[in-house]
Image: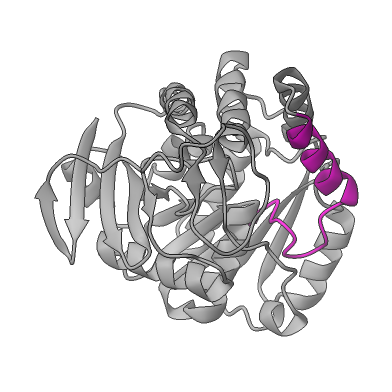
Amino acid sequence: MARTEVDGGARRAGTAREPGGGDSGSEGCDVRMGTGTGAFSGEAARARFMAAYDRALGRWPGEPEAVDLATSYGDSRVYRYPADADAATDREATPAVLLPGLNASPTVWAPHVAALGRDRVVYAPELLGEPGHSTQTTPLGTGDALAAWLDEVLDGLRVERAHLVGLSYGGWIACQQATRSPERVASLTLAEPAGVLAPLRPTFLLGTVAVMVCGVRGLQRRWFGRLIGETGERPEDFEAQLNLTVESLRSFRSRLPTPRRATEAELGGLTVPVLVLLVRGSRSTDARRAAERARHLVPDVRIKVLEGTGHGLPEGDVNRLVPAFLGEVEGVG
């Protein structure tokens, strides 16, 4: 895999730094969120997660290009598509930045980067404070801090303005950025945004905590498999991403802030075009309530309620709707 490090705007070839192994205590899950920095529960846990990460990243189209950025909050890993620098330079459309959900990593975008990157460069950062190649050194305890971190990532990539595409928790981060630095956001795509438009279902929260506390891997796989639902991926690809999610929850202590519902003022103050993608049978959010609130409050919004039974989005719908929306925003097609 090709890698580039960026420090203070100067690019230099090098080897990416691996995250620390955390403490030497017993391994296992820790489902709390809050202040502090994320860490693996031990070296064996880190090794298991990274093996699952590599398998899931194998679904990426072609050889992924990894860029490592130094920020005030720690070193951040970003994947770029297309990997070829000359091919990337030829794409003149506004770049897209893909923000994953918790315990999903950038690998969740593997079925989508080729479609989303057909006319533009696509960047998929790891969420700092989540497991991966990034190393968090400073807490990210608020939405303001996450927006500041994303500002620094965009600076390191030399991206002045981008389309933000956020899945679940990534949708909440995208909203934080659009609220605080609207001049850097060309559009927002909020895919099953976690708690932004409607509260998370109690069954989603309680069920997730219960299966993680129980510690039974088979039960955890069944729960999260049903939670994600049918996405249209090949079974082996779905399994690779599911295994990564379970290993993430079992191996890493996240300390990112809990997402909160956006206020009426925040939603009404969005100045960019917004696409909201919801799943009718989502196990995390009431799609009807979320759609009604978005329709009522967001000034320039398009809402698509997709057929499905999970928190995951149908691959074909995403690969059709999001590129069309980005082209519409830019007056293409």
Of all residues, the one furthest to the front in this rendering is 25
What colour scheme has been applied to the protein in the rendered image? one colour
Q: Which image quarter holds the N terminus? A: top left
Camera-nearest residue between 272 and 286: 286
Residue 131 appears in the picture as rendered? yes
217 sits to left or right of 309: left
220 sits to left or right of 329: right
> Residue drawn 61% across and 22% down?
238
Is residue 317 in the magenta section?
A: no
Camera-nearest residue between 84 and 1: 1
In the figure, residue 310 lies in which quadrant?
top right
Camera-nearest residue between 307 and 264: 264
Looking at the image, residue 297 lies above or below residue 18 = below
Looking at the image, residue 320 lies above or below residue 58 = below
> Residue drawn 41% across and 23% down?
58
**Residue 227 locus on image (x, y percent):** 77, 34
Residue numbers of the magenta segment: 190-214
**Residue 20 locus on image (x, y percent):** 36, 43
Camera-nearest residue between 137 and 286: 137
> Residue drawn 57% across and 46% down?
253
**Residue 160 locus on image (x, y percent):** 32, 70
> Residue drawn 57% across and 78% down?
179
Residue 227 appears in the picture as rendered? no
Of all residues, the one furthest to the top in this rendering is 236
Looking at the image, residue 94 lies above or below residue 295 = above
Q: How many marks?
A: 0
**Residue 174 locus on image (x, y percent):** 55, 64
